[in-house]
Image: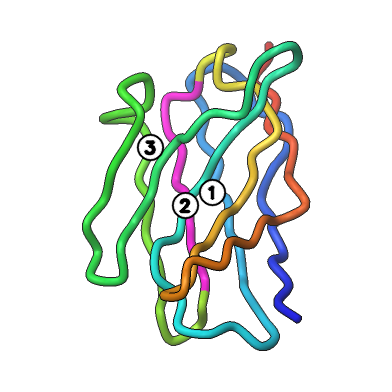
């Protein structure tokens, strides 16, 4: 059974930076797309960024130019570098991966709070 373990969340001031990590372990058949979603209180979960096995990235408009997604295929790990953080980035961030046979896995979530 696959397990996704996230780390790197926390409290940061507006304009600050955080780096999230998500390591996948266990029996996973050919990881394909990896990504990050977030959910703020009272809101639906939304896509933040995705990255293909070959490194093609996609971002929601609100984070373009501030967030960078990357992956280490050898370590089955995906990262999210978040710069110039804003209060509206406050949410629980979830790691997501999809395998080549369309099985989807989720992390447990990590809280990111942007506040002065």
- Applied colour scheme: rainbow
Vertical placement of 26 versus 8: above or below? below
The numbered disc on residue 35 is 2
Is disc 3 in contact with disc 2, using a CB cutoff of under 8 Å? Answer: no
Location of residue 13 (image quadrant): top right
Q: Residue furthest front?
A: 101
Location of residue 91 (image quadrant): top right
Task: Tell me how many marks there are.
Answer: 3
Q: Percent position (x, y) of residue 79?
A: 48, 57
Helix, strand or loop under label 2: strand
Quarter placement of the C terminus? top right
Helix, strand or loop under label 1: strand
Q: Which of marks 1 and 2 is nearer the N terminus?
A: 1
Q: Percent position (x, y) of residue 98?
A: 49, 64
Q: Nearer the viewer, mark 1 or mark 2?
A: 2
Magenta span: 77-85
Q: Earlier in the sequence, mark 1 or mark 3?
A: 1
Name the residue carrying label 3. 67
Q: How far apart are marks 1 and 2 (CA)?
A: 14 Å
């Amino acid at each position: 059974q696959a397990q996704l373990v996230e780390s790197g969340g926390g409290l940061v001031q507006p304009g600050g930076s955080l780096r999230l990590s998500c390591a996948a372990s266990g029996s996973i058949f050919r990881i394909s797309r990896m990504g990050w979603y977030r959910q703020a209180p009272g809101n639906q979960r939304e896509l933040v960024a995705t990255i293909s096995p070959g490194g093609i990235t996609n971002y929601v408009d609100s984070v373009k130019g501030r967030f960078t997604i990357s992956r280490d295929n050898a370590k089955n790990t995906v990262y999210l570098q978040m710069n110039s953080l804003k209060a509206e980035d406050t949410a629980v961030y979830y790691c997501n991966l999809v395998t080549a046979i369309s099985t989807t896995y989720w992390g447990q979530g990590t809280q990111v709070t942007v506040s002065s």
